[in-house]
Image: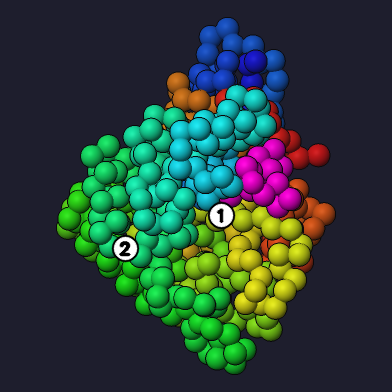
Amino acid sequence: MKIAIINGHLIDPANAIDGLHNLYIDSGIIVAVGEAPAGFSADQTINAEGEIVSPGFIDLQARLREPGESHKGTIASETAAAIKGGVTTLCLPPDTLPIIDSTVVAEQVLHKANIMGSARARVLPLGALTKGLEGEQLSTMDGLISAGCIALSNANRPIRNTLVQRRAFEYAASLNIMVRLQPEDAWLAEGGCVHEGEISSRLGLTGIPECAEVIAVSRDLLLIEQTGVKAHFGPLSSSRSIELIAEARERGLEVTADVAAHQLILTEIDVDPFNSLCHVRPPLRSQRGLDGLRAALADGLFTAICSDHQPHEADAKLAPFAETEAGISAIETLLPLTLKLVSEGVLSMSSAIAHLTSKPAQLLGLDQGNLAVGSVADITIFDPHKDWVVSEESLISHGKNSPFIGWEMQGAVSTTLLDGEIVYTHE
């Protein structure tokens, strides 16, 4: 199909495009920006007047709950939520059931998502660093990569044994494969469910100190320097963590990091009184911590903003706070929360889009994330000024566990294209 997107404001940070341009697509590929190619006749024309046309968003962490927890979500339901939010490519952590620690499971996920057609967005699984994510035995990393995993991770389960961590990094480095790390010192964080501070004390909840993350980052950076592995941290909750990573990058280490959108909007105060929808890991930090994260983002220290999407069934959030399951259904609010950072002067529009597109694409070595001629036509068209209210009815994810229910958001996707095919249009 030949598609013309006209009258839109194109923002393509990878190619320094920021202005009114038409875009032309043929057979899933961008064939022209500006003037139509000779003889081009569109089968469909999309009038994007008053809207922004950008590359499709790339989410570095989104759980789909399949295989293993289909009562929380499925590949079909959560990728449908993804394209509604403008996300065309997402990274799936390995903590599915069964865990993605073998070629069989990796191939199963990829087959269901991309061959059987369950997925509405492009799904890139991460392979497990250790068998069963137990932090004791290394996985068959070369097999996982050969099966189609984009990187390696131990998800949010810390590897307590430093020697195992070192061996895992050495193995990944020998394959020139990136590892994704969610840093947390298991001993300091044990039993915790909120940020250790004023709110945890007032509510009588066991806290997770900020140093639990910072100490883990410090340890990992020393091992990264020792092994030479390419590493990515995230999502982070401490500005001190990203400062350490930036310092290591200046010394030549190949390290990057991301932050979840909700960590840039919410604080520990939103937990009070026992709001289980704000039970997340890493926990929401103090106002000072949020300000530090925003300053680090503005300074260009973060590579990407992710959703850290974790859909849950209603019962998962109905127990006493400490017994509820952590996580937010977040992929549909990724765009408006990022745009909130633009409206509040933290980021420019181009920089915000770069953190959702070109920067994560470059990190993963993907051809997506740009609107250059010859690139795959993964495209998100959105109205940055459209108001909408987050409600259980407006969220199409199986998970309605969002602390933003009732919030008025600004910015909504009207059309999403994947491989040049229109996969979502706002009705």
Q: Residue at x 49, y 42 (%)?
A: 100
Image quarter for residue 296? bottom left
Image check: 345 left or right of 185? right
- Which residue in the protein does label 2 denote? 161
Q: Is residue 79 magenta?
A: yes
Tell me which residue sits at (63%, 16%) in the image: 2
Q: Which mark is residue 232?
A: none
Residue 130: % across, % down: 39, 50
> In this picture, which residue range is highlighted in magenta?
62-81
Q: Quadrant of residue 424?
A: top right
13 vs 333, nearest the viewer: 333
The overriding secondary structure of the stretch rendered in magenta is loop
Does residue 296 lie above or below 188 as drawn? above
Give the crowd class for mark 1: few <14, some 14-19, many >=20 residues within 10 Å.
many
Q: Position of residue 30 (x, y in %)?
A: 52, 22
Which residue position is annotated with label 1? 307
Callout 2, which amino acid? Asn
Q: Position of residue 243 (x, y in %)?
A: 31, 67
Using the rendered image of the protein, determine whether residue 57 is visible from the camera's viewpoint.
Answer: no
| Picture coordinates of residue 314, whole percent (x, y) | 76, 62
Residue type for callout 1: Ser
Tell me the element at label 2: loop
